[in-house]
Image: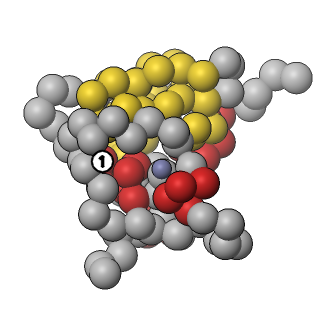
Protein backbone atom coordinates (compact mmCIF):
# COMPACT_ATOMS: atom_id res chain seq x y z
CA UNK A 1 0.00 0.00 0.00
CA UNK A 2 1.37 3.41 -0.96
CA UNK A 3 1.45 6.03 1.77
CA UNK A 4 -0.34 9.27 0.98
CA UNK A 5 1.85 12.24 -0.02
CA UNK A 6 1.11 13.94 3.31
CA UNK A 7 2.62 10.98 5.12
CA UNK A 8 5.62 10.52 2.80
CA UNK A 9 8.71 12.43 3.95
CA UNK A 10 11.16 13.64 1.31
CA UNK A 11 13.76 14.88 3.77
CA UNK A 12 14.62 15.62 7.35
CA UNK A 13 16.96 18.37 8.52
CA UNK A 14 18.42 18.71 11.98
CA UNK A 15 20.71 21.74 11.86
CA UNK A 16 23.55 21.46 14.36
CA UNK A 17 22.84 23.54 17.42
CA UNK A 18 19.21 24.16 16.46
CA UNK A 19 16.51 22.90 18.81
CA UNK A 20 14.15 21.98 16.02
CA UNK A 21 14.01 19.44 13.20
CA UNK A 22 12.45 20.19 9.86
CA UNK A 23 10.66 17.54 7.83
CA UNK A 24 9.63 18.04 4.22
CA UNK A 25 6.81 16.04 2.68
CA UNK A 26 5.80 14.88 -0.76
CA UNK A 27 2.80 17.22 -0.73
CA UNK A 28 5.18 20.18 -0.32
CA UNK A 29 4.43 20.81 3.35
CA UNK A 30 7.32 21.72 5.66
CA UNK A 31 7.05 20.63 9.29
CA UNK A 32 9.19 22.21 11.96
CA UNK A 33 9.09 20.15 15.16
CA UNK A 34 10.91 21.58 18.21
CA UNK A 35 12.99 19.06 20.13
CA UNK A 36 10.87 19.77 23.18
CA UNK A 37 7.75 18.53 21.37
CA UNK A 38 9.58 15.62 19.74
CA UNK A 39 11.03 14.34 23.02
CA UNK A 40 8.01 15.26 25.14
CA UNK A 41 5.73 13.20 22.93
CA UNK A 42 8.12 10.26 22.58
CA UNK A 43 5.76 7.39 21.76
CA UNK A 44 7.74 4.60 23.43
CA UNK A 45 6.14 2.51 26.17
CA UNK A 46 8.69 3.73 28.72
CA UNK A 47 7.60 7.36 28.20
CA UNK A 48 3.91 6.78 27.58
CA UNK A 49 3.15 3.89 29.91
CA UNK A 50 -0.01 2.04 29.10
CA UNK A 51 -2.49 4.88 29.38
CA UNK A 52 -4.87 5.94 26.65
CA UNK A 53 -4.03 9.27 25.07
CA UNK A 54 -0.53 10.29 24.12
CA UNK A 55 0.75 12.60 26.83
CA UNK A 56 3.51 15.19 27.13
CA UNK A 57 6.39 13.96 29.27
CA UNK A 58 8.58 16.92 30.30
CA UNK A 59 12.17 16.81 31.43
CA UNK A 60 13.84 14.58 28.85
CA UNK A 61 17.24 15.38 27.36
CA UNK A 62 16.74 17.66 24.34
CA UNK A 63 20.07 17.20 22.60
CA UNK A 64 19.45 15.18 19.46
CA UNK A 65 22.36 12.91 18.50
CA UNK A 66 21.07 11.02 15.46
CA UNK A 67 18.08 10.16 13.31
CA UNK A 68 17.52 6.71 11.82
CA UNK A 69 14.88 5.61 9.37
CA UNK A 70 12.90 2.55 10.49
CA UNK A 71 11.67 0.48 7.56
CA UNK A 72 9.57 2.60 5.22
CA UNK A 73 7.20 3.93 7.84
CA UNK A 74 9.03 5.66 10.68
CA UNK A 75 12.04 7.47 12.12
CA UNK A 76 13.73 6.89 15.44
CA UNK A 77 15.73 9.53 17.29
CA UNK A 78 18.67 9.07 19.61
CA UNK A 79 18.99 11.65 22.38
CA UNK A 80 22.16 12.54 24.28
CA UNK A 81 20.98 10.53 27.30
CA UNK A 82 20.89 7.47 24.98
CA UNK A 83 17.10 7.35 24.93
CA UNK A 84 16.23 5.91 21.51
CA UNK A 85 13.24 3.62 21.93
CA UNK A 86 10.63 5.89 20.35
CA UNK A 87 9.45 4.78 16.90
CA UNK A 88 7.82 7.82 15.30
CA UNK A 89 5.64 6.81 12.36
CA UNK A 90 5.48 9.27 9.48
CA UNK A 91 1.79 9.74 10.25
CA UNK A 92 2.60 10.63 13.87
CA UNK A 93 5.38 13.03 12.85
CA UNK A 94 3.03 14.82 10.48
CA UNK A 95 0.59 15.24 13.38
CA UNK A 96 3.40 16.75 15.50
CA UNK A 97 3.92 19.54 12.92
CA UNK A 98 4.24 22.91 14.60
CA UNK A 99 4.21 25.18 11.52
CA UNK A 100 2.15 28.35 11.72
CA UNK A 101 -0.66 26.61 9.84
CA UNK A 102 -0.83 23.44 11.95
CA UNK A 103 0.23 24.64 15.40
CA UNK A 104 -3.03 26.46 16.30
CA UNK A 105 -4.99 23.24 15.71
CA UNK A 106 -2.41 20.84 17.15
CA UNK A 107 -3.33 18.67 20.11
CA UNK A 108 0.44 18.36 20.75
CA UNK A 109 1.58 21.25 22.93
CA UNK A 110 4.27 21.80 25.52
CA UNK A 111 2.67 21.22 28.91
CA UNK A 112 4.35 22.68 31.98
CA UNK A 113 4.70 20.26 34.87
ZN1 LIG B 1 10.49 7.36 25.02
ZN1 LIG C 1 2.29 22.07 9.35
Q: Nearer the viewer, residue 106 or 73?
A: 73
SS of the residue at dot 1?
Answer: helix
For residue 14, above or below residue 57: above
Locate residue 2, reporting x and y percent: 81, 22
The image shows a total of numbered marks equal to 1
Quadrant in the rendering for residue 90: top right
Residue at the far left: name it: 17
Q: Looking at this view, name the residue that lies furthest to the bottom.
A: 113
Image coordinates of residue 32 in percent, x first then y, are 35, 43
Percent x, y of residue 9: 55, 25
Eyeballing the image, is 59 above or below 93? below
Residue at the spot x=50%, y=31% of the render? 76
- The spot of residue 60 in percent (x, y) is 30, 56
Which residue is tagged 1? 35
From this view, report whether residue 70 is shown above or below residue 63. Answer: above
Q: Quadrant of the C terminus?
A: bottom left
Q: Is residue 2 visible?
A: yes
Decide if residue 106 is in sight here.
no
Question: Which residue is located at x 70 percent, y 72 percent?
Answer: 52
Point 33% across, 36% down: residue = 82
Name the foreground residue: 45 vs 100.
45
Amino acid sequence: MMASPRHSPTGVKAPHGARVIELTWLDGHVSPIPHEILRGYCPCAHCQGHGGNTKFVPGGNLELMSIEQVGNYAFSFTWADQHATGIYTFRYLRALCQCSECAPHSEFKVVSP
